[in-house]
Image: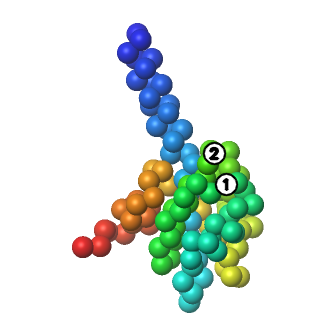
Amino acid sequence: AADRDRAEGAADKAAEKCTRTLHITGFPRREQVDRAALVAALRQFGEVNGARVGAANAVVRFTTPEEAKAALTALEQGVVSLRRSILSGEWAVSDLLTEEALCSASGKPLPP
C-alpha cells in the first residue's frame, strides 16, 4: 500500500508539474516576437518561470499553476494582445522548454 501511495504521489506531482506551462499562438505575422515582449504581455498574470519562443508560437512556463490558469483564462477570453495581435493559448503537453517541446506543441516535426 505504501508503494502505491508513493506512486500515486509521484503521478500527482507529475500532473501538477504539467499545469504551469502554456502553448501560446496568435503572434503578429510580419514581425518576429522576442522573449522579452512576450513575457511583458503575460507578466500581469504571474511570474514567468521560463519561455521558448519560436517564429509563430511559444511555450511559456509560470511559477505556479494558479498563475498559468489565470493567463490561460485571459488568453481564452481574447484579452491578451501583443503588437495589435490577439494571443491564444492552451495547456502545453509538458513543462519542458526545449525546441522539441515547442515543435510538439505546434504539431510540427523536429528540424533535422
Q: Secondary structure at mark 2?
A: loop
Please identify the residue farthest to the top as the structure is shown: 1
Q: For residue 26, say whether it is visible.
A: no
At which x and y percent is residue 100? 36, 62
Amino acid type of disc 1? Glu
- Which class describes the residues within 10 Å of circle 2: few (<14), some (14-19), or many (20+)? some
Q: Secondary structure at mark 1?
A: loop
> Is 28 placed above or below 103 here?
below
Mark 1 vs 2, N-terminal side: 1
At which x and y percent is residue 46? 70, 54
- Which class describes the residues within 10 Å of circle 1: few (<14), some (14-19), or many (20+)? some
Distance from the alpha carbon under mark 1 to that under mark 2: 8 Å
Q: Which residue is mark 1?
A: 47
- Residue at 50%, 45% (x, y): give it: 18
* Quarter containing the N terminus: top left
* Count of marks placed on residues: 2
> Is 27 placed above or below 10 here?
below
Residue 7 is left or right of residue 49, and the answer is left
* Residue 64, numbered circle: 2
- Decide: marks 1, 2 in contact (CB < 8 A)? yes
- Residue at 69%, 69% (x, y): give it: 41
At which x and y percent is residue 86? 68, 74
